[in-house]
Image: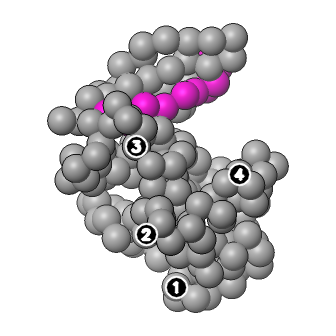
Amino acid sequence: MIETERLHLVPLTYDQLVLYIRVDNSLERAFGLEELTRTISPDLEDALESTILPNVADTSKNYLYSTLWMLILKTENKMVGDLCFYGEPNPEGEIEIGYGTYDEFQNKGYMTEAVGGMIEWGKTQPNIQAIIAGTEKNNNASFKVLEKNGFKKYGKNETLFKWRIEII
């Protein structure tokens, strides 16, 4: 677990991910959290089924690089969002991060704080030299999260801006 000023960042095990997917508050109950209404986007649902769950189940891999990390707001004992890495670092030591804040908790700085916590954690991992991210070109909130954490834009394609921060 990673702790920031306002948040606990908790990596989910395989069994906890199964509870997460149910979206019936069983995960929240398992952690003793306040129940809330949350949904899973089609993209995340697809990623959970096709990539995240199989990678977390693979004991030859470090699950911390593939699982969802839930963000728990300490003062309210509620999940406010989640983030993940898209697999283990590549040969250049890059690891890609993705994240999302639940609607009712947006624009409060929680994701900026959580990404900062993950950067600090990344600095303690021997195989990580840089964290990269991709954001849709119209996602200003995501730009702010990355910019406030020191990421720099380094490229783009038709739909995404690409971001990077060196952490060594």
Residues at marks 3 and 4 touching, judged by CB atoms closer than 8 Å = no
Mark 1–mark 4 Cα distance, whole angstroms, equals 23 Å
Which amino acid is tagged 1?
Answer: Phe
> Quick check: can you spot residue 149?
no
Which tag is nearer the camera, tag 3 or tag 2?
Answer: 3
Disc 4 marks which amino acid? Ala
Q: Residue at x 71, y 64 (%)?
A: 38
Residue drawn at 77 percent across, 75 percent down? 22
Q: The residue tagged with tag 2: helix, strand or loop? A: strand
Task: Tell me the residue that label 3 is attached to.
Answer: 89
Q: Nearer the viewer, residue 137 or 163?
A: 163
Which of the two discs, 1 and 3, sits closer to the camera? 3
Residue 137 among magenta residues: yes
Determine the image quadrant of residue 3.
Answer: bottom left
Density class for disc 4 (Cα within 10 Å; few <14, some 14-19, many ≥20) is some
Task: Work out how far the residue at label 3 is from the one at label 2, CA to CA, in angstroms.
Answer: 20 Å
Read off the residue under disc 1.
31
What whole-number distance in Å separates the C-alpha atoms at marks 2 and 4?
19 Å
- Mark 2 vs mark 4, foreground winner is 4
Query: Looking at the image, is 104 positioned above or below residue 99?
Result: below
Which sits in the foreground, 63 or 73? 63
146 or 105: nearer the viewer:
146
Q: Quadrant of residue 93?
A: top left
